[in-house]
């Protein structure tokens, strides 16, 4: 039986990618927190750092918070 593209995707998106994705997610949250602190938004920076500390164990919760922050940014820009 020949491998399908779905089989190839399962091989490529196996265990190692999940670890890298979590590490990249934490790094991006820390970078966003640094920028927020530089821009004078300490409350947002501490929320982002808190999300970075939770990200490896609860990635879905972290993505939910990132979405909420993005929606809040859009709301503020439109107001």
Image: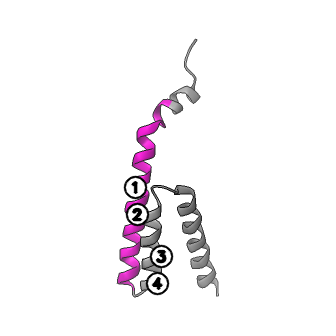
Among numbered discs 2 and 4, the one appearing first in the sequence: 2
In magenta segment, residue 51: no
Among numbered discs 1 and 4, the one appearing first in the sequence: 1
Query: Does residue 29 lie above or below 45 as drawn?
Result: above
Location of mark 1 (residue): 24
Whole-angstrom CA distance, mark 3 to mark 2, is 13 Å
x%, y% of residue 12? 46, 34
Q: Which mark is residue 47?
A: 3
Location of mark 4 (residue): 43
Mark 4 lies on a secondary structure that is helix
Answer few, some or many: residues within 10 Å of disc 2's Cα (few below 14, many 20 plus, some between 14 and 19).
some
x%, y% of residue 71? 62, 73
Q: Which mark is residue 28?
A: 2
Mark 3 lies on a secondary structure that is helix
- Which span of residues is magenta-colored? 11-39
Is mark 4 in CB contact (under 8 Å) with mark 3? yes
x%, y% of residue 46? 43, 78
In magenta segment, residue 14: yes
Secondary structure predominantly adopted by residues drawn in magenta: helix
């Amino acid at each position: 039986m020949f491998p399908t593209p779905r089989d190839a995707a399962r091989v490529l998106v196996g265990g190692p990618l999940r670890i890298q994705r979590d590490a990249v997610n934490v790094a991006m949250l820390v970078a966003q927190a640094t920028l927020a602190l530089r821009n004078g938004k300490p409350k947002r920076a501490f929320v982002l750092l808190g999300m970075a500390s939770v990200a490896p164990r609860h990635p879905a919760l972290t993505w939910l918070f990132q979405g909420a922050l993005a929606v809040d940014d859009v709301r503020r820009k439109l107001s």
